[in-house]
Amino acid sequence: QAQLVESGGGLVQAGGSLRLSCVASGRIYSINVMAWYRQTPGKQRELVAAITNDGSTHYSDSVKGRFTISRGNAKSTVYLQMNSLKPEDTSVYYCNANIRSYTSASPTDYWGQGTQVTVSS
């Protein structure tokens, strides 16, 4: 089994910045994709950004140009640098990873516990 632990959420004023991090641990053979989602009560879960093992990235239109996703050298950590934050960015942010472990027969999606990001106007 694998675990994802997130950190970096908090309260920030509009125009400010936050950096989220997510660390994967466990009996990990490889991580194919790591991503950040966000979900606000009453709304669908939204893909914010994703990064593949070869470094290819994807961003939602609402955050393109403001957010940057990256992976650490060990490829077990993913970061989300959030700049020029807006009140509409307020949400619970979740780390997601598709992980192949030494004990599992096939890759499995894992989710972090979520971290609250609140942007005040």
Image (cartoon, rainbow, N blue to C red):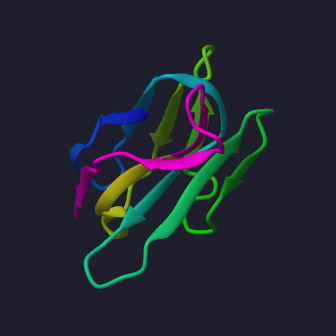
Magenta segment: does it hold 103? yes
Which residue is at a point 35% across and 70% down the rendered structure image? Answer: 88
Residue drawn at the location 63% of the way across and 14% of the way down: 73
Image position of 37 with respect to 108: above or below: below
Residue 115 position in % (x across, y down): 27, 48
Going by the image, does 71 lie left or right of 118? right
Pinpoint residue 72: horizontal percent, then vertical percent: 58, 20
* In the image, farthest residue toward the top: 73
Residue 3 figure quarter = top left
The spot of residue 116 in percent (x, y) is: 23, 52
103 over 107 or under it: above or below: above
Q: Is 46 located above or below residue 75 in the figure? A: below
Q: Which residue: 53% across, 59% down?
A: 48
At which x and y percent is residue 45? 43, 72
Extent of the magenta region: 97-121
Question: Is residue 54 shown left or right of residue 13?
Answer: right
